[in-house]
Amino acid sequence: MAASDLRDSERLHHDVSLRLRDVDQRYTAGRRRLVERLAKLARPVTIPELVGGATGLALSSAYRNLSVLEEVGVVARVHSGAEHARFELAEDIVGDHHHHLICESCGRVEDFTVAAKVERSIEGTLDRVAAEHGFVVTSHSLDLFGTCEDCTAT
Amino acid sequence: MAASDLRDSERLHHDVSLRLRDVDQRYTAGRRRLVERLAKLARPVTIPELVGGATGLALSSAYRNLSVLEEVGVVARVHSGAEHARFELAEDIVGDHHHHLICESCGRVEDFTVAAKVERSIEGTLDRVAAEHGFVVTSHSLDLFGTCEDCTAT
DNA sequence: ATTTATGCAAATCGTTTGCAAACCT
DNA sequence: AGGTTTGCAAACGATTTGCATAAAT
C-alpha cells in the first residue's frame, strides 16, 4: 500500500468517526471493518458480500450499522432493483460523483464517471426539469442496465 | 374521450394481444384491465394502486400478469427503491422515452422527457462508456430523487 | 377436451426488531 | 454505573408459489 493510500485511509476513518460522534454514535470495530471493506471493494456490494467472510458480524448488525452510516452520509444505498440491496461509500465521503453499470445477468454493479463537461450539461438540464415540476432535487442517478463483459462471454 | 384516443386505445390492446399470442398467452379481462389502468394513469404505479379498487383481481394474479406483460415487453418495472415495486407501460409500447422524478417523501413517481438533442448527447456518452467496459446496454435510467411539490408544501 | 388463468392460502426471503448479554467511556 | 452495540431468534412484509377451480380456445 502506498503512503498516500494510507493517509487516505486514515482520513476516511477520521471523517467517519467525526460524523458518528455528531450523533452520539461510536465508531466500533464492526463499523470500522464495514467501512474498510467498502473502501477496498470500491463498488456497490450486497450485505452478504460485505460480511460474507468468516469473522463477519451478524447480518442484523450489518443492516443496523449500514443504516446508521447511511444516515450520517457515509454510506449510500444503490437502488439496483435486484434481490439484495447494495451499499457503497457515499460520494461526499470519497469525493467523486459517479454512475452505475448494472448487470442484469449477475447483478454486479460497477461505477463509471463521465467528463465534467458532460456532467455539468446533464445537471443543467435536470435542474431546469426539476424547477418546472416544483421538485427539490437531492440527487440523481444515471445508470446503465445490460450485460457485463463476464456474462456476455459465457 | 376524443376519437384519436379511442383509436390509440384500440391499437394498444391490439399490440398487447399480439405480443401475448406470440408466447401462447391469453389476453384476459384481468390483463386488459391492468393495461387499461396503466394507460390511463400514465405514470409508474404500485400494485396496490393498480388493483386497489373494488373489483380488482387478486394480488397474486396481478403480480403474475405483470410479470408476463413485462416478459413480452408491454410493461416496465421501475426501480424506485421504495417498499413497493412500480410498473408502467413499456417505452416501446407507448412510443416515447422518458425519465423519472422520484419523491423520497411520498414515493410518487412522475415521468419527464428531455430535449431530443440532449438525449442523443447523453446516449452517445453512455455508448462510449459501455464500449470501454465491454458492457452490452439494454436500457438506461436517468432519474431525479428529491421532494415533490406536494410534499414540499407540507 | 385441453390448456391457461384465477383465487386463496401457504411458503419464501431480504430486512427489521425485541431483548438480554457484552462493550465502551 | 450509564448508555450503546451486538447476536440471536422471532417478526415483518412484499413477492412468489402450490393447488384446486374457473375460464378461454
Image: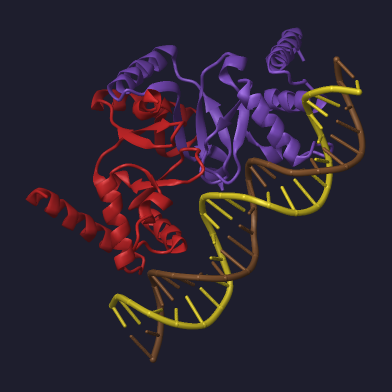
Chain colours: A purple, B red, C brown, D yellow
The residue at 58%/38% (across/down) is A108
Q: In which quarter of the image is residue A26?
A: top right
x and y, in percent, of residue A126 in the image: 35, 21
Q: Can residue A50 be seen in this view?
A: no
x and y, in percent, of residue B79 in the image: 46, 40
Q: In which quarter of the image is residue A131?
A: top left
Count of marks, rendered view: 0
From the viewer's perspective, is B109 left or right of B9? right
x and y, in percent, of residue A68 in the image: 67, 27
From the viewer's perspective, is B148 left or right of A54? left
In the rendered view, tell whether residue C12 sits above or below residue B141: below
From the viewer's perspective, is B41 left or right of C23? left
The residue lying toward the viewer, choosing from A115 and D17, is D17
In the rendered view, tell whether residue B128 sits above or below residue B32: above
Q: In which quarter of the image is residue B102?
A: top left
The residue at 28%/46% (across/down) is B41
Quadrant position of the N terminus of chain A in the picture = top right
In the rendered view, tell whether residue B151 sits above or below residue D20: above
